[in-house]
Image: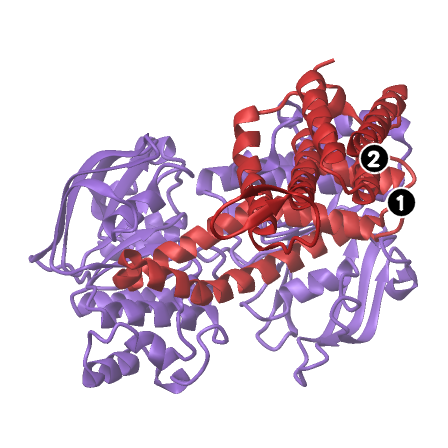
Chain colours: A red, B purple
Amino acid sequence: MKHLLNDMNPSFKFVIVTLSMIVMAFFFNPWTPLIFCCGIVLLQILFSQTNWKLWLVCMLPFAFGAFGYLWTTIVFGRASSGTIIWSSGFFDITDQQLNLALSLSFRVLAFSVLSLMFAFTTAPVKFVMSLMQQMKLSPKLAYSVLVGYHFLPLIKDEFVQIKQVHEMRNVAVKNSRWLRLTSIYGMLIPTLASSVRKAESAAFAMEARGFTGEPRTSYFRPIRIKPRDYWLSLLFSALLAASCIIGVLLEK
Amino acid sequence: MPEEVIRLNNLSFRFPDCSKAVLHNVSAIIHRGERIAICGPSGCGKSTLLYLLNRLYPLNCDGIVSGEIRLFGKNGEHYAPGEINRRIATVFQDPDAQFCMPTVEEELAFTLENLHIPQADMEERIAGILSLTSLTEWRHSKIHSLSGGMKQRVAVACALIMDPEVLLLDEPLSHLDPVTARDFVCWLDRLQQLRQLTIIAVEHRLVHWKSFFKREIRLGKDGRVIADGPPAEIPALLFPSRLSGKAAEEALRIQGLAVEIDGKTRLSPLSFSLTRGEVTIVAGPNGSGKTTLLKALCGIHQASGTIQAISRRGYVPQSPEFMFLTQSVSQEVAYSGISSLQEIKGLMNRLDLSTIADSHPFSVSHGQKRRVAVGAMLADKRQILLMDEPTAGQDAASLQELYTLIGQRTAEGAAFVIVTHDMSFALAVADSVVLLKDGAMTGKYSAADFWTRDDLLLAHHLLAPEGVAIHEASIE
């Protein structure tokens, strides 16, 4: 039970997440995203292994963003109608305005919670493999993403190397934040040069192993669609429908 | 006579944007089961020839080919893309840039999927190739966590799983330490006999291969075949004899130098000293802390302990281009502004950089890049130079050049600390050797009596170079 979301077919999950986002965009009230948001977190708590500490850290910027929406809409939004519910020396807040502000910020929260749910429960390699198998993504594109993903730590190591050598040559850079920022430009060229070289050798190596980019006919570890994928999709859809209906009812 | 697998008829090749041909009228017949080394100086078209054999060229570079390549009795051009690659497999030089999946098993499966092998047969073939190559233990290992030697073995396994008839190798040993390289060659020898493979390898130094190859095709600088036959007696790379530039004045003394990164001890306290003009080789197995030592010496890594030195230390990384900051060679050397114009001019002349003063540092040859890096360090008044793996992947000419460079600089009083796996180079250049193992220093030994101590060498994954006997004789 604790792995259901992690084990769910990544393409299926991807489609459900995308659909939910599109549907949510049509419901502009504070309740729909709020309910949906709480539901997703609940599902994630029940059916997945998540590092919640990391989740909170990742959620932080989105929370700031949501608060930013709330604040700017309240303070700068032009209230045209509605009853004033709170007033300070500089601005008045009407109930409509508050409603608008909450709708916006909860929507931001709902989208980010949904995205994080996807990111935290999906292994990147498995996702790409599944896209290739279920969504007919071209192997050319799929494997270039995989190789790129695979190269990230290598490129980071090299970037650190380059940075260290540059700092040795120009000690001033080490001690000044501004110089450190501007010197990144100089480091990009060596990093880029070696990345291009690496990319070429990787492409050669793949081709030498018979990779032509044509669709594959068999997979070593096929990623299949199982009954649980339908059940989970149903669960997501139910949550989405419930939050939409309740949202609309409460709005009235 | 075994059947013929590859026939080259007057093969010439040039790149589209270059008027000069890389390969000139190359003709050769290769039979099943042969072990062939393709040798020659850098830039002679060795790798190009290899890429023509597995059909990566000319399609990938729009190169212009004349003459004919017959593969298994059929014109190479008549094979569909990818068709020939399952019969002629390739292993590349860089262990890091030839994998695209995270684990060994998935990487092998990637190859099988390319070949449209039915899923039911995959398991059997993967298990089979893993046991053939003695890699079963590493089946689920993450490839990036393996050592360079293991990565090359995995690359060979990935090539062999296609059940190829010909195996092409592109300088497979250049990133391996001597003992790992020797083990790799023994392992490959056994595999070749088991599978009756035809092996064609590009290699500019045959020393590590001992008697592995039965035939050598040697290409000249202009891309013509200059020799084709049994390998010539392997000449131990002989460097002109050099007077040690070692002087009495101490250049560097370190005491209790230790490095700790993120709470992990990378280097236990070590102490040694160095005089002006001395060349010290730092050697030891992969991951023993050699690079960490260099980086601590030049201040890249925070280190405890004391360093007393006549000047700052200059670090030259394995890829010299990592340190370039400007648009031209002359600006690069003058970058720090520490030396006067006059001094820089003299330095550029002595390093033979004046002719390329206006070139972009990325556009010059590898040897020149290294000279630019050394020049920049010397212009910073850094008289102690730390070089990280300057010999990796270098051909004989480039090594000679490096050797000369070191000889001239030591004569001027600079001291060198050099990390290298190339023991014949070390033999020629070293005044002393510092051995590292597991982040601790075993000791600093004088080069005069170091090379005969087999126990010490083996314990540090080193092998005495071929030339030891000759060298000793020449000294006597």
Cβ atoms under marks 1 and 2 closer than 8 Å: no
The kind of residue on which mark 2 rests is Ile
Q: Position of residue B352 (x, y in %)?
A: 34, 80
Secondary structure found at label 1: loop
Circle 2 SS class:
helix
In the displayed structure image, the side of residue A118 where residue B124 appears, left or right: right
Q: What x and y, as percent, mark residue B436? A: 30, 37
The subunit carrying tag 2 is: A
Residue bearing the label numbered 2: A16
Residue furthest to the top:
A1
Q: Residue at x 38, y 78 (%)?
A: B329
Q: In the figure, is residue B92 to the left or right of B294?
A: right
| Location of residue B48 with respect to A86 vertically, above or below | below
Which quadrant of the figure contains the C terminus of chain B? bottom left
From the image, tell me which residue sits under label 1: A136
- Picture quadrant where residue B405 is located: bottom left
In the figure, is residue A230 to the left or right of B97? right
Query: Residue B214: x percent and y percent?
Result: 64, 50
Query: Distance between the Cα atoms at labels 1 and 2?
Result: 17 Å
Q: Chain ID for label 1? A: A
Q: Amino acid at mark 1?
A: Lys
Query: Is B17 in front, or is B248?
Result: B17
Coordinates of residue A170 in the picture (x, y in percent): 29, 64
Sequence-first disc among 1 and 2: 2
